[in-house]
Amino acid sequence: VKLTLIPEYESGDVILPAITVDVLDRQIISPSLIKISADENVFEGNELKLIDIERESVANKWINNFGERKEVPDNYNQLRVFMKNRDLKINLICRAYNEGVAFSYEFPGQNERDSVTITNETITFNFPSDHFAWSAARAQAPYSRVPLTKIEKGCERPLVIEIDTNLIIALAEAKLVDYARMKFNPDSTRNYNVITYLESPVHKPLPFQSPWRVVMIGKNPGDLLEKNYLL
């Protein structure tokens, strides 16, 4: 599994971070924009600048005393990208696992502020085809197998997407604590996109890190279920 971060991706007249995801040399998620809307218009315009990059590899495991799997692997390659928009610092953290990929953003301590309000988080997951997905409009609602272009507005996570007969993924979130839920909308202006949004604004003291945005990857639904420890 390969996760590529493009810190300064040109999209029209703005520059935004973007990611791609590849499995076995096949790109399953095309350049997908990440836009964080805050009280300082983070990730908008041409003022977003790359400051530094840190890389780290982790090979670890931890013991789960309460779950169905006692020993949980925790192996990944991590990239932390330090960025700045005007005077506001923000970092992107990207991880590639054998089981999938994950990314989050963090606001470190700032010189002249002690909090930030996130008004929305728009990640445009860009798929090359109109794959079938399992859509549900709310928690505990029935799921429907529909093309990506036909998922319901406010679709629940995880959103399971059938890439082909031997590859299935799930768009999900992890470590959701004291934060608004992420949900999905279809893209009415462009084919095959799935767009995230937050159910409400979030006001957080600094420093803080967002929940993880996760792309789980498996051979079939059972394989995905076996990897639920990633969440």
Image: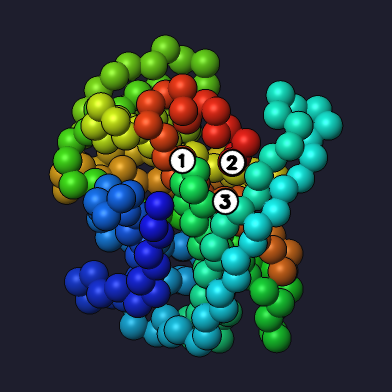
Q: Residues within 10 Å of mark 1 (few under 14, many from 20)?
A: many
Q: Residues within 10 Å of mark 2 (few under 14, many from 20)?
A: some
Judging from the image, the colouring scheme is: rainbow
Circle number at residue 212: 3
For the residues labelled 2 and 3, the Cα–Cα distance comes to 10 Å
Residue that protrudes farthest toward the right in the picture = 65
Circle number at residue 230: 2
Which image quadrant for residue 173?
Answer: top right
Q: Can residue 16 be seen from the camera position used here?
A: yes
Of callouts 2 and 3, which one flags the residue occurring earlier in the amino acid sequence? 3
**Which residue corresponds to the image point at 46% horizontal and 63% vertical from the top-left?**
37
Q: Position of residue 118 (x, y in %)?
A: 55, 59
For label 1, the residue is: 216
Circle number at residue 46: none
Q: Position of residue 8 (x, y in %)?
A: 35, 77
Q: Is residue 86 found left or right of 112 in the rendered image?
A: left
> Does dot 3 land on a helix, a strand or a loop?
strand
